[in-house]
Image (cartoon, helix red, strand yellow):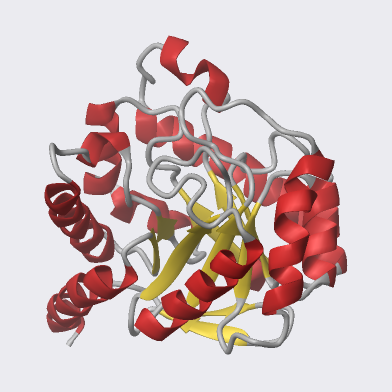
Amino acid sequence: MRKLFYWKLKQREIKLGERTVLLGVLNITPDSFTDGGKYSDPDRAFARAMELEEQGADVIDIGAESTRPGSKRISASEELQRLVPVLKRLKGRLTVPISVDTYKAEVAERALELGAEIINDPSGLTFEPQLSRIVSNHDAGLVINHMRGRPETWAKLGPMPDPMGTIARDLEAAVNRARHVGIDKTRLVIDPGIGFGKRKEQNSLILGRLPELAVFDVPLMVGPSHKHFLAHDSAEETRYATAAAVAACILGGAHIVRIHNVREMRAAADVADDILATRQA
């Protein structure tokens, strides 16, 4: 079963649960896994955002700092240098909402001023807890993603004992922090953070046990796309593996999936939605 929710954003609300919502990824970084440097030019980024919407993305998620394993942190000014020209070009041009992938309060504030409606915090409010107050002030949506450690130290982390218990405890603490500063529950989405400091086999375990996260009574997002544990020898094989993971996420109760290949994953999501509907009939 997948519960229905209405996710309240700055200027609209999104119905979640009837049909899987696709969060299309637009990396404007020079060093991301798959498209590093490809969309760092603002004109190319603009064209890609329009293309993602045309292919069926329900939200465009823009990231200007990489959180791939081993990546280094950048300053807020450098992140804004990449992000602001793209947001200015996109303002008023998309019919779908823009999400910005950042953990920095300063970046979040500027992004929301420039028309973004969602902040997707990869750190789950652990790097800059004051970010939650910015989100609250702007009546924006907030995705709380679970991260263990920091990208630059992930390679040194040992296996996570009790992955689901740890994720649930950490997410509960982050949700409580968000609620404490006045963010309404209707604005929150949680994400177990596939690949964010988790080992390969633990990512599969998390996908298999997603229904346990329904206890939070908030919508669930999962981002399996292009994660290490799905990597195959060719890009085509990796896309097939990602489609399988997307279907597993949906059948496990995910309301939103964060993906790069929108057209292909829309096809996978539609099939999984049809299967899920037979359980709920």
Q: Position of residue 24 (x, y in %)?
A: 44, 67
Residue toward you, 31 or 194:
31
Q: Position of residue 132 (x, y in %)?
A: 78, 53
Quarter occupied by the C terminus: bottom left
Query: What residue lies at 43% left-to-right and 75% top-to-bottom?
Result: 52
Q: Position of residue 140 (x, y in %)?
A: 73, 70
Quarter occupied by the N terminus: bottom left
Residue toward you, 204 or 278:
204
Q: Decide: is 25 above or below 168.
A: below
Query: What residue lies at 45% left-to-right and 43% top-to-bottom?
Result: 193
Q: Decide: is 250 above or below 103.
A: below
Q: Name the side, left or right, on which 106 lies relative to 9.
A: right
**Residue 49 in sight from this viewpoint:** yes
Q: Name the side, left or right, on which 197 lies relative to 124.
A: left
Query: What residue lies at 69% left-to-right and 35% top-to-bottom?
Result: 126
Q: Position of residue 161 (x, y in %)?
A: 37, 19
Q: Quadrant of residue 215?
A: bottom left
